[in-house]
Image (cartoon, coloured by chain):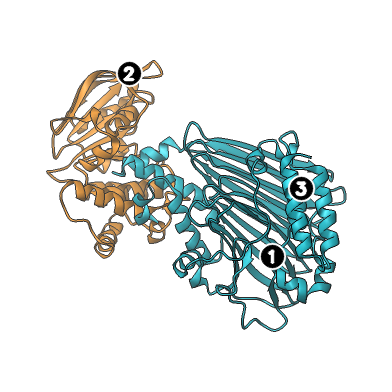
Chain colours: A cyan, B orange
Amino acid sequence: MNKTIRHYLADFKQLQNIKKDDWFSKQRQSAFNIFQESGFPSTRKENWKYTDVKPITKKLFSNITNSNVVISDNEIDAILFKELECIELVFVNGAYSEKYSNIKNLPNKLTIRNMANAFVNDEDFLKKHLSQYVNDDSSSFVTLNTAFIQDGVYINVPSDLTLERPISITYISKDNSNIFATHPRNLIFMGENSKATIIENYIGIDDANYFTNAVTETSLSQGASLKHYKIQQESSNAFHIGSLNTSQNKDSRFESHSISIGGALVRNDINARLNKEGAEIMMNGLYMTDNAQHIDNHTRVDHFKPYTQSNQNYRGVLNGKSRGVFNGKVVVHPQAQKIEAYQNNANLLLSDDAEIDTKPELEIYADDVKCNHGATIGQLDNDMLFYLRSRAIDEQTARSLLTYAFADEIINNISFQSIKNKLEHLIIGRLPDSSLIREYV
Amino acid sequence: MLHIKDLYTAVDNKKILEGLNLSVNVGEVHAIMGPNGSGKSTLANILAGKEGYNITQGSVSYENENLLELSPEERARKGVFLAFQYPVEIPGVNNIYLLKAALNAIRKHQGKPELDAMEFMNLVKGKMKLVQMNKDLLSRSVNEGFSGGEKKRNEIFQMAILEPKLAILDETDSGLDIDALKIVAEGVNSLRNKNRAFILVTHYQRLLNYIKPDHVHVLSKGKIVRSGGPELALELEEKGYDWIN
């Protein structure tokens, strides 16, 4: 056993000791056993070919949540999307913050609880559903998360409820005396014909040194509709591995918007299962990297049944010596006729040293389907640059403006106006020479 | 105002302009005519500062400055304007915001105060009528989804707002139906004055039925082979470009 696994084992024993009366401890143990068996993925694994997780596995993070870290009102004000008037759940270094959360006055029958609390109050439901929408052997990071679940969010939207207020889940990480890992776990269950909007926001304060290993499971019943936003703005020293796992019933609709701009080494996975006729998923993603950042986006869509639809559109803006990865896989299973699957990945390289590995994959076992995929990698368009400069716009501003316009194509797919505005500001802040273009947008 | 002397250029070792001479004074309208491949668009692009042309010999002075040393944006700020033959679509960059930024960059260069949003919109309303611009096009992305005619009108609209000293129109008439051509020509005519010069690059004589040039030049194989008054354009129309060679 290597040093890292020994370290995780020691932490795991400590956690099992703390939670020895927990109904989940058996599952915890079996998850850890699988993890211990498989270890961390190496680049020899096809799914991890372009992303070497050694920087993560080299470090010995503390895996036991420490709830003593406090953040100031000023810090929280800069982070939360106050104007959206969300149902708010806030976590600091993995621990639920009652002070900054607001889950009062919920509609009838709607359940929203932090996971630690749900383990006590919603045992029956969790026993049936937790870990059901994710493959424990899909990734050792998922099993590691399952072994170390300490907190997160449980949401159960009852049938026929249309939830107007978005639910915002914010995971804040702030420097601690030692480097730490958090394993947030979210379970979202959407009843028949229910509708909701959920924002997952991962953010680091200062240059905190930590590892976020997050897993979200969602299940959409017949006719349900979920709009899901993931905003990844971890600190520049942080590692983030996160997966979104969806399981969709008949005529349900999932909208995923993933904006990934932070972190040193990041991996976002989306595993979408279209289990019944009429299920539909839209995946919209933007990643922006600079310096030595590495952001990997992996998507996998399984079309199990006829008349299902998936539509993916990812864009990357890469600067400095950063590296991006896009790997999108669509599997059309044998009986899944009349499906539609589209996938597009466009990348803008702003520097000679930036790198992108893009790999769209289609595996089709049905014969009556509409599928296409494509990937592009390019620099800023010289004709556009010249046009802007010929209109008295200086070169730097023109470059920044065109970069923004490229990224904004993804943000424009967001129908929720106030989230869109918020994200546009976030993106502008990440552009080279952002101050130059504020008056244009 | 503009003096082009003995200009030679090449792209990828292919010679395009071979000893071109042209002088334009303020207030004048010059038409440059020539067959395809004679170097007309190259000349327009070089004057506006497009990269990729290798200037092997000769000089271009504009208001007693070496124009070739200026960046495209510096040229624009000093009053050079190119109406593009094929205006590019720029998704995500708003037409009207771009135009306001362009105008304010030029005004700043001239030492004038920048216009605020209200003043700018008042200016826009006046100029829109000039080229019968559809107001919906203003709030769209630059040229995105515009028809060919709308793109050309947008170029003239921009010109009307930016009020250049030297306007170069690169085949603005191509692809326009007769009504659109008239609108564009009226726009240009209304901007003619003693402080502004125009270079009209065109393949056909028909634009010159509506905009009467002071001078007509025929460009062939990279240099001006004949110059004259408006009657030269008519002669060309009648006899064709073969007559020149």
- Between the residue at mark 1 and the residue at mark 2, the CA separation in whole angstroms equals 76 Å
State the count of labels. Answer: 3
Residue A242 x %, y %: 67, 53
- What residue sits right under mark 2 in the picture? B221
Q: Amino acid at mark 2?
A: Lys
Q: Is residue A424 above or below residue B176?
A: below
Chain letter of disc 1 in the image: A
Chain letter of disc 3 in the image: A
The mark found on residue A151 in the picture is 1
Q: Amino acid at mark 1?
A: Asp
Q: Answer left or right for A367 relative to B152.
A: right
Q: Which of these two is toward me, B37 or A36?
A: A36
- What residue sits right under mark 3 in the picture? A139
Q: Which of these two is toward me, A65 or A343?
A: A65
- Between the residue at mark 2 and the residue at mark 3, the CA separation in whole angstroms equals 67 Å
Marked residue nearer the N-terminal end (1 or 3): 3
Residue A161 x %, y %: 70, 78
Residue A184 x %, y %: 67, 60
Q: Amino acid at mark 3?
A: Ser
Q: Residue A320: in sight, yes or no?
A: yes
Q: Which of these two is toward me, A247 or A231?
A: A231
On the same chain, marks 1 and 2? The answer is: no
Q: Are marks 1 and 2 in contact (CB under 8 Å)?
A: no
| SS for callout 1 | loop
Q: Which of these two is toward me, A412 or A184?
A: A184
